[in-house]
Image: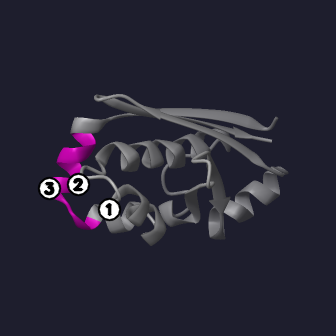
Amino acid sequence: MHGIGIDTVEIDRFRRLLDRRPSAADRLFTPDELAYGRRQRDPTARLAARFAAKEAVMKAMGVGLGAFSFHDVEVVAAPSGAPSLVLRGGAAALASRLGVEGWRLSLTHTDSTASAVAVAL
């Protein structure tokens, strides 16, 4: 294991951000992530969990905001619904330099919080 990262997002606070700055969603999420979230009447919890995953990936690699684009980390869902990660661009290059060969990801949310744990293998 190379690293582990965890992040928690307050859903109401995240909702206010998206309401105040609608363009933030396009900056933070890939088109497929936005489509996945928007399958629900209120996509906020799903999007907040995906944002937490991106932050958890940064923490697992020991970097902070700005190390790579949010679009460089994408959360994808298997047919079973299990989440996994696709890294590209700067995130993929950093992971390669660190010797990361794979990832494990866990997402969860309640009515008030969304959390993610990312493990770099």
Q: Residue at x 35, y 30 (%)?
A: 113
The residue identified by callout 2 is 18
Among numbered discs 1 and 3, the one appearing first in the sequence: 3
Secondary structure under tag 1 reads helix
Extreme left residue here?
20
Task: Read off the magenta span.
Answer: 13-23
Q: Nearer the viewer, residue 61 or 78?
A: 78
Query: How would you rate the neighbour count of disc 1 (Cα within 10 Å): few for under 14, some for 14-19, many for 20 or more?
Result: some
| 34 relative to 79, above or below | below
Instruction: State how far apart marks 1 and 2 are (Cα).
Output: 7 Å
Q: Position of residue 41 (x, y in %)?
A: 24, 52
The answer to whether residue 16 is left or right of residue 71 is left
The residue identified by callout 1 is 25
Task: Report if the CB atoms under discs 2 and 3 are less than 8 Å apart.
Answer: yes
Task: Give the main secondary structure of the magenta stretch.
Answer: helix
Q: Residue at x 57, y 59 (%)?
A: 73
Q: Position of residue 71 (x, y in %)?
A: 51, 65
Please state which amino acid type lies under the numbered disc 3. Arg
Query: How would you rate the neighbour count of disc 2 (Cα within 10 Å): few for under 14, some for 14-19, many for 20 or more?
Result: some
The answer to whether residue 19 is left or right of residue 10 is left
Please state which amino acid type lies under the numbered disc 2. Leu
Tell me if residue 20 is in the magenta stretch: yes
Q: Residue at x 31, y 52 (%)?
A: 40
Secondary structure under tag 2 reads helix
Task: Report if the CB atoms under discs 1 and 2 are less than 8 Å apart.
Answer: yes
Instruction: State how far apart marks 2 and 3 are (Cα).
Output: 6 Å
